[in-house]
Amino acid sequence: MKTYRKSQKLFKQAEAVIPGGVNSPVRAFKAVGGNPIFVERAKGSRIFDVDGNSYIDYVLSWGPLILGHAHPKVVKALKSATEKGTSFGAPTALEVELATLVLKAYPSMDKVRMVNSGTEATMSAIRVARGFTKRDSIIKFEGCYHGHADGLLVKAGSGATTFGVPDSPGVPKSYAKNTITLPFNDLNALKATINKEWKSIACVILEPVVGNIGCVLPKLGFLETLRKLTIKYGIVLIFDEVMTGFRVSYGGAQEYYRIKPDMTCLGKVIGGGLPVGAYGGKKEIMSMVSPEGPVYQAGTLSGNPLAMTAGIETLKILSVRGTYKKLERLSAMLGKGLIDASKRAGVATKFYRAGTMFCTYFTDKEVFDYATAKTSDTSKFSRFFSGMLRRGVNIAPSQFEAGFMSLAHTEKDIEDTVKAAYESLKEAEK
Ligand code: KE4
């Protein structure tokens, strides 16, 4: 029987010194109830909590650890990099090496700038798009999360094509009014909005596969039409591939769906578990970025040698022939097993997957946007989550998050996961 005494004690201490006891809200288990486990260490496909419990991990730090935790080659490279100094605030060859690897994988980009988080990447990309087009409005889609910059914490105003309203206290109405929020996969709303507002629209930003409401796939023709419309009206198309990058495929969703965006945001995997974000695009757009151009963006630790080292080692391993074939085989095996477990347990679920990211929704409806994702039975999901945790499987503590596969997961891990899922599904159904 698992005990969580040390985690519970630590959580009490954490709540006294950190807001909500965590440094990022989703970690607090608010969506599923109970207290978070505190992790002591991780290796391969597993994490180990401070009470000595171990879990097969499908959160993988919300995506970055696609090689699995503490990959020996990444650890070795980081150790030697640390001995040479941790940050210089001056250019290094490592930044050139990672930028070159990223541009090779994402040919839609001519140049890329390293930052320290996905939030910085999207915030900066939007600023550059506004500077390039001299327009102020942006379009985003309901349920897409692009980090916590003010102008992105916005929900749809009343009526699909009116400007947004703040989705968090502290965001001035004046910031939100430039953000139009539309339903994902809704081509009618998109066409109506762009036809009406194109003169003021600098960019459309989206997660090409929406990982922040679980795993929502673009409908056939949605991305293609979006690409055509944005070209027609001179609107910058930004693919936020912070999560889908190197996850949906090595070249991200843009490779998988064969769409060339004007700008791309990356993060997570390219840092190999260290803080990195990146934004890039066509040279005529990126030439706007200071000091080459007038749009200002900066960062003390941008491109720091440790994060670059972890990213380079990670991409080198990912670029080895056959890697994504193995990732696809493992991900497909898990998907098939989870779908089968739901059928055997007699629980209505919908499973979606794009490469190595996936989600099981507790609904019998097809999920293609925020509204349909919200038809999920979140209390049933919470019971499922607790059952999986008790059985040694760590999944995201929210129905509206994606799960992730790593190269370190084994067939035995997946068999054990499916077994735990079957038992947890039956339990959740009661
Ligand atoms: P960060 O600022 O958290 O590095 O990246 C923001 C971001 C931007 N774009 C996409 C598509 C993202 O998924 C994210 C962050 N993802 C969440 C997971 N849903 C991070 C987890 C968290 O907030 O703790």
Image: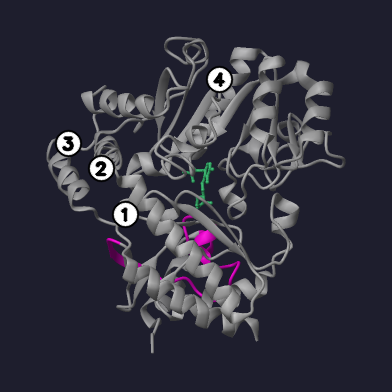
Q: Residue furthest bottom?
A: 1
Q: Nearer the viewer, residue 37 or 235?
A: 235
Q: Residues within 10 Å of mark 3 (few under 14, many from 20)?
A: few
Q: Secondary structure at mark 3?
A: loop
- The CA distance from mark 1 to mark 3 is 30 Å
Residue corresponding to mark 2 = 317
Residue corresponding to mark 3 = 85
Q: Earlier in the sequence, mark 4 or mark 1?
A: 4
Amino acid marked by disc 2? Ile
- Mark yes or no: residue 38 visible: no
Q: Is residue 60 left or right of residue 241?
A: left
- In the image, the segment drawn in magenta is 19-44
Q: Is residue 404 magenta?
A: no
Mark drawn on residue 173:
none
- The CA distance from mark 4 to mark 1 is 35 Å
Amino acid marked by disc 1? Leu
Residue corresponding to mark 4 = 128
Q: Earlier in the sequence, mark 1 or mark 2?
A: 2
Whether the residues at callouts 3 and 2 have beta carbons within 8 Å, the answer is: no
Q: Give above or below for 331 relative to 133.
A: below
Residue corresponding to mark 1 = 407
Q: Is residue 297 left or right of residue 191?
A: left
Amino acid marked by disc 4? Val
Tell me where residue 105 sits by quadrant.
top left
Q: Give above or below for 60 relative to 236.
A: below
Q: Earlier in the sequence, mark 3 or mark 2?
A: 3
- The CA distance from mark 1 to mark 2 is 10 Å
- The CA distance from mark 4 to mark 3 is 32 Å
Amino acid marked by disc 3? Gly
